[in-house]
Amino acid sequence: MENQTRNRFIIFAFVAAFLLLASGQVLAMGLGAPVINLKMKYSSRGKIGPVVFPHLTHQKVLKCEECHNPGTLNFEIRKQYGMGNDFHEKFCFPCHEKMDVPDGKVCTNCHKSEKKKKTALVK
Ligand code: HEC
Ligand code: HEC
Ligand code: HEC
């Protein structure tokens, strides 16, 4: 009887330790910025206006894993310039098409003028 109680306690301790670690990792990773300037983040030298990515808006409707595991996006960036760049082709466009996002491929929905980038939309 005493052994059983001890075993239960050990199992409980393991589960508690696991939950603590898991929540610690989520906290350590954090939600990231609510809005991210991708042109700046990837030091793009292209001419088109910066993409001000509404991170929080996406977090509200999608699971994190649909875009990235901690630290890395779900695709590799090999081509950064021109219309056929990997952000368009492998990431933003396919999902916007799949999910029928209104104006999901309209340039100015993502590329903002330098002036507007500070007042980007956050929902
Ligand atoms: C769904 C969002 C989205 C839409 C819509 C979009 N883009 Fe982009 N575009 C991006 C992202 C993200 C990047 C990579 C980050 C950056 O360069 O700011 C990018 C990069 C680019 C680049 C390469 C970088 C550069 O500055 O040269 C060009 C060119 C470009 N886009 C043109 C366009 C044009 C033209 C349209 C409309 C026909 C368009 N984009 C529509 C998200 C979008
Ligand atoms: C629609 C796609 C998408 C979803 C969903 C998403 N993220 Fe992100 N996340 C991005 C992009 C794009 C970046 C910026 C590019 C990069 O960091 O390489 C980013 C960056 C981050 C960063 C880096 C910090 C920063 O501010 O630059 C963290 C942390 C992060 N996301 C956490 C999360 C968490 C946690 C979730 C789920 C609650 C989540 N993201 C959901 C696309 C997404
Ligand atoms: C995995 C799916 C997915 C990916 C990847 C994704 N989006 Fe979206 N995006 C959505 C959905 C779904 C919405 C509609 C959200 C809503 O209206 O609540 C949206 C909406 C938007 C909007 C409009 C937000 C608003 O306030 O109305 C912008 C701008 C946008 N996405 C930019 C981007 C850019 C830039 C990228 C690539 C860096 C990207 N998205 C990648 C699913 C995605």
Image: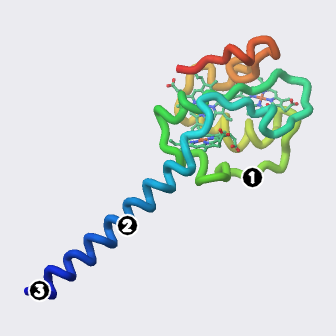
Q: How did the renderer colour the structure? A: rainbow
Say which element carries label 1: loop
Q: Residues within 10 Å of mark 2 (few under 14, many from 20)?
A: few
The amino acid marked with disc number 3 is Glu
| Mark 1 or 2, closer to the camera | 2
Q: Position of residue 10 (x, y in %)?
A: 27, 78
Q: How many marks?
A: 3
Q: CA distance from mark 3 to mark 1?
A: 55 Å
Q: CA distance from mark 3 to mark 2?
A: 23 Å
Quarter of the image with the N terminus is bottom left
Q: CA distance from mark 1 to mark 2?
A: 35 Å
**Residue hosting label 2:** 17
The mark that comes first in sequence, 3 or 2, is 3
Q: Is mark 3 within 8 Å of ligand 2?
A: no
**Residue hosting label 3:** 2
Towards the viewer: 107 or 63 = 63
Within the displayed image, which quadrant is ligand 1 positioned in?
A: top right
**Residue drawn at point x = 14 percent, y = 84 percent:** 4
- Residue 64 appears left or right of 107: left
The answer to whether mark 1 and mark 2 are in CB contact below 8 A is no
The mark that comes first in sequence, 1 or 2, is 2
The amino acid marked with disc number 2 is Ala
Tell me the quarter of the picture where residue 67 sits: top right
Q: Give the answer, above or below, for where 9 lies relative to 46.
A: below
Q: Position of residue 99 (x, y in %)?
A: 53, 33
